[in-house]
Amino acid sequence: MINLFQKHVNRIARTIAATLLAALFITFLLQIFSRYVLHSPFGWTLELCRILWVWIVFLGSAFLVQEKDHVTFNLIYSSSSFKARYIMSIVSAVAIVLIMGWALLPTIDYIDWMKIRKTATVKFPLTGDKIPLSYVFSVYGIFMISIIIFYLFKFIKILKNGPSEFDQSKSKLRTIVKY
Amino acid sequence: MNIELVIFLITLFGLAGIGTPVGYSIISASIMYFTFGDLDVALAGEKILQGLYKSFVLLAVPLFITAANIMNAGTITDRLLNFCIAVVGRFKGGLGHVNVVASLIFSGMSGSAVADAAGIGKIIIGMMTKDGRYSRGYAAAITAASATIGPIIPPSIPMVLYSVISDTSIGYLFLAGIVPGLIMGLVLMIMNTIIAHKRNFATEPPVPLKKLPKTTIRAFPALLMPAILLYGIYGGVTTPTEAAAIAALYALFLTGVLYKSVSFKSLYEILVDSAKSSAAVGVVIGGAFILNYIVITENIPGLMTAFLQDIDISPFTFLLLVNVIVLLLGCFLDATTIILVIIPLFIPICKALGIDLIHFGVLVVVNSMIGLITPPYGILLFVINAVTGITLKEMISEIWIFILVLLFALGIMILFPQLILWLPEMFGYKV
């Protein structure tokens, strides 16, 4: 049940992420086109790119990036004994759930408060209204909730099945291009 | 040191040390800091969001990542390699030279060392080890070493990151990387020649000169990419960020339209993978914005400068010291972490000591790229191991000599800032 749910979420997340990145790319090209070919910049392109970038980072981290794809320092973890890894992964999961959970409501308050600020140039396509920044930043709230849930499940999983193995070469097999 | 800073450091190093993702460790630690410092805990989210949202330069990161992924998916790399074999394959230790030259050209097209090692590297290691002409370890080692040039010659993802944390011009940084990249290529080729003579490596059958024009034409559209990027940026047509989009577009045009080697399905996979990599880096970049806020709140720059005035350190000693620190950290930490988390601490001191930030940036990037091939934590070694199956043990016994020559190149760059700075100065940079 949960696996099936995860599979669907993952598929939707992949499609959304690919679409957002494609949109970022196209918007950028439009910007260059408007400035150097039409000689009158669209104006809204830059702001839209920045919105898309924020969404790619946090939606991606929430639903797409697996723990092993993240930038981590795992020398200690990978060379520790089973028992030590058990403790480490429990501490890590519990700390994130508690700390992120503690900051969740104040952060949502902040995001909601940002409704007083609006985008400068990007407008809703149909109504033509400017977009409140709370909409733009809401993705960070989604990100926090998803991280809390993920580590809560991870915590339960560790209690049931023990800590995950860590093989560095395997984790880098999915060549993450970042340098 | 106040209590909130102590708790911050304990949480940060504690969580990151036991394998929590670095980005999440920074967010958690800063929430603790704000809690115990009686500040609003929402500041963590605010700094991340505002930082990512306001930085225009950062938009180059997802685009350069996408461009690199597109190039590796198509046949661009094959054509490039055939061209390099025709040009330098005829010399002693030919394929070793091909390896370095191909990396030099590829580095002018992509800003990623990992993309270089996983793309070109994989193919050329296959060629070098066929018939046992080169030992597997040697083939892998020279590939890893030459891949470090990727982010030195523009475009460069790590330089984009450095430009954000140091507030320097990305355009000048890119220019400053060109000569150091060539120096690194040169020392690697000299080392390859020496070893090739010593171990009597094979020479490629020389490609007849009359075939050269054809090979060049086949590779020409790919060879044009660095020229387009440089002209775009320095001819004033695009900003460095926009050049990233042009690079991706051109790579898409080459692989999709001209060479017809990328399908829609694989394009979709490329976009997903690129979004994933961008998000993973983006979280750490976001974390760097909170760190920056805390560093300023605690007036760490002021404290460090005062400390340095007390011990009366010379700029040269300081540069040497920082480079040793970065080199040591590079053995254990990820380059992203070093540039985004550690380096911001040194920037104010550089300013106080009058060290040029462009010079400093190039040194830091070169140094942390050497960190990509230093055991035990050398990402490039892992990547090559993953794509070729050559064991870390085989690589490590051969990689030392290349690390040494790259360090020699770094030493030259530390001693002679003018080597790095003359090109930006020609384009109007004022030290």
Image (cartoon, rainbow, N blue to C red):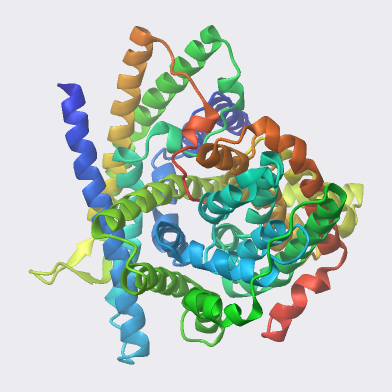
Instruction: Please state which of residues A176 and B61 is positioned toward the viewer in this rendering.
Output: A176
Horizontal and vertical percent position of residue A89: 46, 18
Instruction: Please state which of residues B242 and B182 is positioned toward the viewer in this rendering.
Output: B182
- Tell me if B74 is positioned left or right of B13 in this view: left
Q: Residue furthest left?
A: A126
- Tell me if A7 is positioned left or right of B288 in this view: left
Instruction: Please state which of residues B113 and A41 is positioned toward the viewer in this rendering.
Output: B113
- Tell me if B309 is positioned left or right of A165 in this view: right
Q: Is residue A116 above or below residue B235?
A: above
Horizontal and vertical percent position of residue B203: 73, 59
Query: Does the image show residue B149?
Result: yes
Q: Is residue B397 above or below residue A179?
A: above
Q: Residue at x 46, y 60 (%)?
A: B68
Horizontal and vertical percent position of residue A153: 30, 20
Q: Residue at x 76, y 48 (%)?
A: B304
Q: Residue at x 28, y 75 (%)?
A: A44
Instruction: Please state which of residues A5 and B339 is positioned toward the viewer in this rendering.
Output: A5
